[in-house]
Image (cartoon, rainbow, N blue to C red):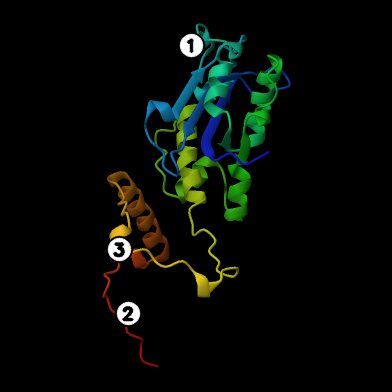
Amino acid sequence: MAARNRLITLDTETTGLNAKGGDRIIEIGCVALDGRVMKSTKENHLQIFINPEREVPEDAVAIHGITTEFLADKPKFSEVADKFLDFVRDSTLVIHNAAFDTGFLNMELERIGKGRIEDYCDVIDTVKLAKKLLPGRAVSLDSLCRYYEIDNSNRTLHGALLDAELLAEVYISLTRGQDTLTLVNEDIDNLPPMPKEEDCVIIRANAEELAEHNRILDIAEKKSKSTPAWRKEPNEPAPAESAP
């Protein structure tokens, strides 16, 4: 299956932990990334509350706050499945502890004869990704928010859309870095000429991108206890070497 370029973070809330034992999805939250930027637009967000056709246990309500009474007039999964699939189709889903959410999604899709989520999307598990990139660190969503200094103060209860928004910020932070650059296979004697300056198009960062850039520099400065190169003046002298 070819890689899908559109990235969508996804989270679900459920009536319990056992998809095969009768628990059902009660909320789906999705956030589509615009490139590597999360935008607060209706087109980039999807939130669906679902009538699970069963009671929501009190221990589950204590986690997410979604009650049986609140869901009573909400549509069944079969009534919103196409809306959900239209939003995520041909994308790559970014999910924290993906096996849990895909297990529930597959249970719901198979119940109505619509296959499995993997038939429509690729899946990235950010728990596995975080363990690989941050060995030895706690990789819960809250722990990663603390590590990357992402504000999760509104997360007093679990909520699918809120968690999908936080996961989008975590994923961007996890995967930020220099892409591979290699000239090993390049014929350096026959490289194309540099374009003339007047032929170049300058695309300047907007206010939102500059704010995110400065947020990351703040983290880098704090963790390294030194000024990042991007914040040094162009002609700032190198620090003098101390005498032997």
Q: Alpha-carbon distance for marks 2 and 1?
A: 63 Å
60 to 130, vertically: above or below: above
| Circle 3: element type | helix
Q: Which residue is mark 2?
A: 238
Neighbours of disc 2 within 10 Å: few (<14), some (14-19), many (20+): few
**Residue type marked 2:** Ala
Q: Residue at x 57, y 53 (%)?
A: 137
Taking the image as shown, residue 239 lies to the left or right of residue 174, namely left
Residue tagged by mark 1? 70
Of residues 116 and 55, the one drawn nearer to the viewer in this rendering: 116
- Which amino acid lies under the numbered mark 1 shown in the image of this protein? Phe
Q: Quadrant of the C terminus?
A: bottom left
Residue 62 screen position, x and y as percent: 53, 23
| Amino acid, disc 3 | Glu
Residue at image position (70%, 16%) is 113
Residue assigned mark 3: 197
Q: Residues within 10 Å of mark 3 (few under 14, many from 20)?
A: few
Front: mark 2 or 1: 2
* Image-quadrant location for residue 17: top right
